[in-house]
């Protein structure tokens, strides 16, 4: 197995074999048991670096759905009834978030509940999906033609005058499972407003916009924050799968911008801070977007190949502890930390960006690996 060095160029890229993909999946599955033993009845938020020291939340904040979703995905891989029951138990604990004033409910209930209904026909999960769709749809603001960030989960007092890119993909997928036609209509209105305010002609995304003088205006430099760009790409790929053009053209433009602006397969956290940390998790999200796009365009093999190369770079980097060759520390060789993916750049309680292990990062990496292994379809999650 050839291990990529951090920062290697695209021309040097290698691809994981199927055996290596399955080995990485096995490591992530084993890792879940370790995390679960530490968090008990709480939700894992993040663990700095590879320390295995988790900050645990009783309610899960915006991350809770990924913890449930990770178990739904594990059950999809293993076929285990006990894994499915575990996912359902965590899913049930998400119900308190239905009333939260936050668009982050889209991620909570798409990943945390809708996957359980989609993959396993779980009735309780379906009930949560229906309740969440109604609650989120009720947050639609006709004046700005979208669903605002909201005041909860860190949105603050001005949250209802702000829109963000992070939840575009999950909003489209969740609301289009609504039984009433108003919910797909709202999701398309929201997507179009995001495009009008946050998307640029060269494919770069602003990550947020605020209401100023009765108009939503972008508040940051487009394309600088890698994870924001990747979330936008994933959202556009979902829009393209749902509605076709013009979203398909926009999705291709956003993915081309990613390739032209990120010259290393392990993306930096910010393009305007070259000395700052990387954010391998953004490369994972971008890869998921490309895998969706690959099924929609004639030159899909090119996008599928590039996504595979990015996932390889992440999995064989030092930020994923799954292969003995990635590291030299004895405890890793003994398998005590197998499956840690600590490549998520995150602002922690200490007030600055750190690379952490997180439930959302590990879920998304596992989802991408499952697509490469043909366990799930790109459109599944």
Image (cartoon, grey):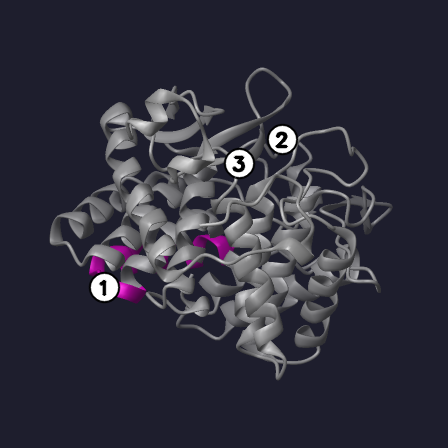
Front one among 299 and 89: 299
- Point out residue 238 in the picture as x, y percentages from the top left corner: 55, 67
Q: Is residue 42 above or below residue 131?
A: above
User: Circle 3 is placed at which residue position?
Assistant: 343
Q: Is residue 24 left or right of residue 107?
A: left
Q: What residue did someone put label 1 on?
A: 120
Packing grade of label 3 (10 A; few <14, some 14-19, many >=20) is: many
Residue name at image x 68 percent, y 58 percent: 11
Q: Nearer the viewer, residue 146 or 366?
A: 366
Residue drawn at (49%, 44%), measured in percent from left and top? 316
Query: Could you tell me which secondary element the residue under label 3 belongs to?
Result: loop
Q: Nearer the viewer, residue 62 or 160?
A: 62
The outermost residue toward the front is 1
Tags 1 and 3 in contact by the CB under 8 Å rule? no
Q: Are marks 1 and 2 in contact (CB under 8 Å)?
A: no
Vertical side of 25 occupied by 270: above or below? above
Residue 136 on the magenta span = yes
* N-term mark: 1 or 3: 1
Residue 354 counted in the magenta span: no
Q: How far from the left and from the top, in percent, is residue 155? A: 61, 35
User: Measuring 48% from the left and 75% from the top, which residue is drawn there?
Assistant: 181
Mark 1 to mark 3 CA distance (whole Å): 30 Å
Residue numbers of the magenta segment:
118-138
Q: CA distance from mark 1 to mark 2?
A: 37 Å
In the image, 56 versus 377, the foreground residue is 377
Q: Residue at x 49, y 24 (%)?
A: 49
Residue 39 visible: yes
Which numbered disc, 2 or 3, marks the residue closer to the eye? 3
- Disc 2 to disc 3, C-alpha distance: 28 Å
Mark 2 — residue?
A: 156
């Amino acid at each position: 197995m050839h291990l990529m060095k951090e920062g290697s160029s695209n021309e040097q890229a290698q691809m994981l074999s199927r055996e290596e993909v399955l080995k990485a999946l096995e490591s992530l599955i084993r890792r879940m048991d370790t995390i679960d033993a530490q968090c008990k009845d709480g939700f894992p938020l993040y663990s700095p670096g590879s320390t295995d020291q988790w900050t645990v939340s009783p309610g899960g904040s915006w991350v809770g759905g990924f913890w449930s979703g990770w178990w739904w995905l594990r059950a999809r891989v293993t076929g285990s009834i006990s894994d499915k029951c575990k996912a359902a138990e965590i899913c049930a604990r998400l119900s308190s978030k239905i009333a939260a004033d936050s668009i982050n409910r889209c991620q909570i209930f798409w990943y945390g509940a809708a996957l359980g209904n989609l993959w396993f026909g779980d009735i309780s999960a379906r009930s949560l999906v229906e309740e969440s769709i109604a609650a989120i749809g009720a947050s639609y603001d006709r004046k700005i033609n979208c669903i605002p960030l909201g005041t909860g989960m860190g949105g603050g007092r001005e949250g209802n005058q702000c829109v963000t890119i992070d939840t575009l993909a999950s909003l489209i997928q969740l609301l289009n499972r609504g039984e009433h036609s108003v919910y797909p209509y709202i999701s398309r209105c929201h997507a179009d407003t995001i495009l009008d305010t946050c998307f640029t002609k060269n494919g770069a995304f602003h990550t947020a916009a605020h209401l100023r003088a009765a108009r939503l205006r972008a508040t940051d430099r487009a394309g600088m924050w890698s994870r924001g760009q990747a979330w936008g790409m994933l959202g556009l790929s979902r829009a393209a799968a749902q509605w076709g053009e013009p979203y398909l053209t926009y999705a291709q433009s956003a993915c081309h911008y990613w390739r032209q602006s990120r010259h290393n397969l392990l993306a930096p956290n910010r393009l305007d801070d070259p000395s700052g940390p990387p954010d391998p998790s953004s490369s994972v999200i971008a890869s998921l977007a490309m895998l969706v796009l690959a099924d929609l365009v004639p030159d899909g093999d090119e996008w599928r190949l590039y996504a595979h190369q990015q996932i390889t770079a992440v999995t064989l980097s030092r930020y994923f502890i799954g292969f003995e060759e990635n590291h030299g520390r004895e405890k890793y060789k003994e398998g005590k930390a197998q499956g840690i993916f600590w490549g998520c750049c995150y602002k922690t309680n200490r007030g600055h960006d750190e690379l952490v292990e997180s439930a959302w990062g590990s879920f998304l990496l596992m989802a991408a690996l499952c697509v490469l292994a043909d366990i799930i379809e790109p459109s599944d999650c």
